[in-house]
Amino acid sequence: MHTDSPRSRVLVPLLALVAGGALLAGCTSDGGDYTSAPTEGGPTIGPSPDLRAAEVPDCLPEGTATAATGPEDDPTLVAWTGSGAKAVLLAPQNQSGPCEWADQLTRLAGQGYLVGTFSWSENSAQSVRDAVQVLRTIGAQDFALVGASKGGTYVAGLADEIYPKAVVALSPPAEFDGESGRATDSTYDGPLLVIASADDTVVGADVSKLVSRADDPSTYRVLDGGAHGVALFGGPHKAEVEKAIDDALAAGFAN
């Protein structure tokens, strides 16, 4: 299991964030349920979450801020860096968290995005929803979802609920803990890219292909080798995978 070790660093001024974010679309006075209904001002997926101070893991780049949200006994840690109205949320693999996305946080923030990632709580779907809502609270107006392995399943599976500009899934299982990422189970029709490795022994390429659209070959790309999920950034296809993500984000945010 991958663990994130905290270090002492200046923490984000959470009270200021909450005070500013409470007026954003998506905040309800009664703390009501999440809703999938879009509005004229953009999609709303629920009230602004309660944010609590949290230490920044050592692994994350300087300038990263963090907050905990959700139940105190089972929180989701959300980390972000960069700024702007266009946000990218990076969903981690199973039993992992923000550290595995450290390099991509830096890279994508350098391209002008507000970039966030998070740790999983026991309620994985809610962790994704809450992380998106944290990004909205701090200024995101549009966002894209990128996920690896389990994270890929969840960003694909929840896309028809939270309306991202684009979805990229690396080595996603077709289903994880009851959450289906299959394209046939989703009404999401925005930009989608699934990347798999031909010899992946963790999740077979044919299984990941189910997350792509059968009637649109451009939504699926298979690479040689056996790299799984974020390991794609550590092998010979690193530049190709990063360019594919960049192109998907550019296409999504252009719409």
Image (spheres, rainbow, N blue to C red):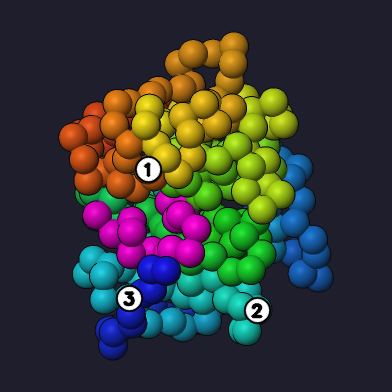
Q: Residue at x 26, y 44 (%)?
A: 233
Q: Give coordinates of residue 202: x percent, y percent.
A: 45, 44
From the viewer's perspective, is 60 left or right of 170? left
Pointer 3 residue = 57
Residue 188 located within the stretch drawn in magenta? no
Check residue 104 in the rendering and tell me which mark sits there, or answer none.
none
Badge 2 element: loop
User: Which mark is first along the chain, 1 or 3?
Assistant: 3
From the viewer's perspective, is 34 left or right of 147? right
* Crowdedness near tag 3: few (<14), some (14–19) or many (≥20) residues, C-alpha within 10 Å: many
Q: Give coordinates of residue 84: x percent, y percent.
A: 37, 51
Q: How far apart are the two marked residues, 1 and 2, measured between alpha carbons?
A: 31 Å
User: Which mark is first along the chain, 3 or 2?
Assistant: 3
Marks 3,1: beta carbons within 8 A: no
Query: Does residue 28 show up?
Result: yes
Closer to the eye: label 1 or 2: 1
Marks 2,3: beta carbons within 8 A: no
Badge 1 element: loop
Check residue 228 in the rendering and tell me which mark sits there, or answer none.
1
From the viewer's perspective, is 230 left or right of 150? left
User: Which mark is first along the chain, 2 or 1?
Assistant: 2
Instruction: Single out the residue that lies furthest toward the bottom.
Output: 8
Q: Is residue 237 above or below residue 87?
A: above
**Start-end of magenta stretch:** 90-103
Q: Residue at x 65, y 79 (%)?
A: 71
Q: Is residue 54 above or below residue 255?
A: below
Pointer 2 residue = 71
